[in-house]
Image: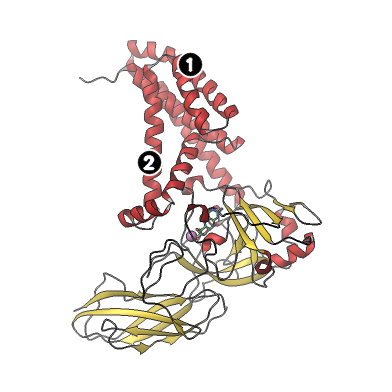
Amino acid sequence: MFRLPSSLIVGFSAAVLLSGLGLLARMWAAAPYPPQVLFDRISQFLGTPAMFNLIHHLLGVGQGGKIAAFLGVLLLWLGGLTLLGVLGPVIATGVLLLVLLFVVPAGWAVGYAVLYLLIRLALQPAVIQHQQGRREALNALGVGSLAITVAASGSLLKKVLDGTDQTAASAFKAGSPLPEGIVSQDDLYYVSKNLEGFDPLLSAEKWSLKIKGMVEKPGDLTLSDLKKFRQRDLELTLNCISNPVGGFLIGNAIWTGFTLRDLLNQVGVKQGAKFILWKAADGYIESLPLGEAYEEDVMLVHSINGEPLTPKHGFPLRVLIPGRYGMKQPRWITEMELSSSDVPSYWSQRGWDKEAFIKPSSRFDVPEEGKPVVAGKELMMKGVAFAGKVPITRVEVSVDGGKTWQEAALKDRRSKHAWTLWSLPWTPEAGIHEVVVRAYGAGKLQTDQTADPLPSGSTGWHRFLVNAS
Ligand SMILES: Nc1nc2c(c(=O)[nH]1)N[C@H]1C(S)=C(S)[C@@H](COP(=O)(O)O)O[C@H]1N2
Ligand SMILES: [Mo]
């Protein structure tokens, strides 16, 4: 029978133990986690134009590319550590230290190396035991690894629960039925430079927003400090610059928080300041020209549809800026600096448009691409149209591939920052039809020139074939 060499079993067990303990250190001491750091570097590479387009074509715009990258990194990390099992404890530790020095700060690299050495030395008796009784040794290692996994998931869960124990101050009652056109927090699209498991999990008690740079009153404001500003609701559509034509990286919700201007007035902006520079807990950086920051509807928000933001969607505080794509609006913000000069932002460093002004788009929700419809029966075609700060004034639909057009009915919006819902009845004859939708922003027809999301947002009309039978 094939037997794994005991050195690889030791290597693998050490890998699991080190990774589990590292995860705990990350949660409780904010230690850099080597697989995460490696993944961050790789995902930054995935965000560069050539890779983004390749992955987008191979795997779609979902989380596929990121997950594949992370699995690859994990395989490298666990596989590499497992192979270290063939070297003696001291030499293996030396090799690991060399590698870690390229990945995490020196202090943490040494810390990890020492931990690894201790694990290896502790595992040596297990190997001897393994040679006598394979089962006991493996059991002991298995129970140990399991205990660590359970402890790690337990603390993760506790952090999530701690983090969300907050009350919202919204006129909109959490749990009441959502008005038409509002997307629930659970259904809101999710885009992050991080793998979801590595998004920041911030604690409401420990978190504060640092205000620095060209202000009269620098300092740290806690969530309760910030909730003293006049609280208000704003319905606004969030739109990712990566959204393809007809895509779902767009959503509309009621956000609660305060006007950024109130905060700026309180901290006193100094003469000569021209930009706000944001920093977030995941290392994301963005900026906003100060003039725009004083606009009425630029807000910092802590709640969505009457409930606190979940960690995934930015707990405890995120920025809302009408008219700009999601990338300009950092989540998990920790720092706001007033500065006389701008800095490149996270995505603009990777080839995306720095300004990220929202481009007009329109989409079908009914009929759905790829789903047949019933011939001879009336159906209500529906969808959304959005152009950022520019109001949608007209939506037209064609069911013959663009030869003839009909005007759709538009629903009145509750907020000038919300998408526009459109509808139009249609009784399809049996056969194949090409449906097309196009919107007008402030009277101007959206362009039919197709453009990729990269670098400054997709353009083109949403069109597809529908089979009626
Ligand atoms: N700190 C931080 N903020 C961020 C991002 C990020 O990766 N890190 N992604 C941005 C992008 S590209 C978008 S489209 C929105 C998405 O927000 P959502 O996932 O809550 O819908 O968050 C923005 N804010
Ligand atoms: Mo985005």
Question: In the image, residue 13 lies at what x, y percent?
Answer: 41, 24
Apparent side of residue 333 relative to residue 138 in the rendered image (left or right): right
Q: Which mark is residue 71?
A: 2
Q: Is mark 1 within 8 Å of ligand 1?
A: no
Q: Is residue 468 above or below residue 115?
A: below
Residue 2: x, y in percent?
22, 21
Mark 1, residue position:
122
Q: Residue furthest right?
A: 216
Disc 2 to disc 1, C-alpha distance:
28 Å
Task: Judge from the rendering whether residue 399 lies leftward or rightward of residue 365; answer left or right.
Answer: left
Tell me: residue 139, above or below residue 162.
above
Question: Residue at position x 26%, y 71% from top?
Answer: 371
Residue in front for this viewpoint, 468 or 130 = 468
Please report contact status of discs 2 and 1: CB closer than 8 Å, yes or no. Answer: no
* Sequence-wise first label, 2 or 1: 2
Callout 1 secondary element: helix
The secondary structure type at the circle numbered 2 is helix
Image height of 51 relative to 302, above or below: above
Q: Residue at x 56, y 51 (%)?
A: 284
Amino acid on which the number 1 mark rests in the picture: Ala
Q: Position of residue 234 (x, y in %)?
A: 61, 72
Q: Nearer the viewer, mark 2 or mark 1?
A: 2
Residue 229 visible in the shown view:
no
Nearer the observer, 200 or 44: 44
